[in-house]
Amino acid sequence: MRKFAEDRLLVATHNQGKLEEIEHLLKPYSVSVCGAAELNLQEPDETETTFLGNARIKAHSASKATGLPALADDSGLSVAALNGAPGVYTADWAETETGRDFDMAMNKVHVLLKESGNLEPWLAKFCCTLVLAWPDGHDEVFEGEVQGRIVWPQRGKNGHGYDPIFLPDGYNVTFGEMDRWEKNKISHRADAFDKLVTGCFD
């Protein structure tokens, strides 16, 4: 596994919250972190059908465009009773002509679960795949997940996306009811990041 020896890392995201989260996690390693918006990078088309495929597209595209090592993630919600959906299409389920509507997306999950005839508990997991890519084309891959179940109605206004309907195993509050930094300690992204730090930074 290749160790990260550079002093600057590009995070291939336009999401400021995600950027802050990664900056926070890498603080002990004296790495300067910058985001895609800062370097005026366009988001490439995500044409793959797996989290790994789309994370690779984003990481390699950003690294080639800037000459910097780049980190990208692709993540989503997988519901067992819906055969793993929405999965790689997690964000797509929220797309409307006027932007993303996650209330609509969460309602779609609930409606499909009811129509499926499957009884509660509706088991689910959040998955995250991280790809760290270098300009020479090399990459390292790290996968994380957090198990839980879908609850209805929605609970909590924190977090983003499907957080208000996801109850992680061992907790009685949804991701939508959790403090942001508390959630970040147990999330699918945290699991993948632990593996990244152990593999490439420690």
Image (cartoon, helix red, strand yellow):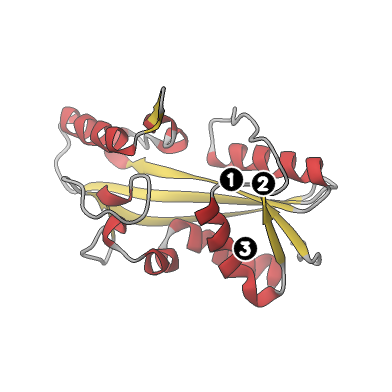
Q: Which residue is mark 1?
A: 14
* Residue 96 location (% of width, % of height): 39, 25
Left or right: 7 in relation to 45: right
State the CA–CA distance, disc 3 to disc 1.
21 Å
Work out whether mark 2 precedes mark 1 in sequence or the reverse, and give the earlier one.
1
Q: Secondary structure at mark 1?
A: loop
State the CA–CA distance, disc 2 to disc 1.
6 Å
* Residue 41 location (% of width, % of height): 70, 40
Left or right: 105 in relation to 155: right
Residue under the point 21% across and 53% down:
155
Disc number placed over residue 196 in the picture, else none:
3
Q: Secondary structure at mark 2?
A: loop
**Amino acid at pointer 2:** Ala
**Label 3 crowd (10 A; few <14 / some 14-19 / many >=20):** many
Q: Is residue 26 above or below residue 168?
A: below
Q: Which residue is mark 2?
A: 36
* Residue 154 location (% of width, % of height): 20, 47
Q: Secondary structure at mark 3?
A: helix
Residue under the point 37% across and 45% down:
161
Residue under the point 60% across and 65% down:
23
- Indicate the quadrant containing the C terminus: top left, top right, bottom left or bottom right: bottom right
Left or right: 163 in relation to 46: left
**Label 2 crowd (10 A; few <14 / some 14-19 / many >=20):** many
Q: Are marks 2 and 1 in contact (CB under 8 Å)?
A: yes
**Amino acid at pointer 3:** Leu
Quadrant in the picture for residue 2: bottom right
Left or right: 115 in relation to 70: left
Question: Which of 25/124 is in front?
Answer: 25
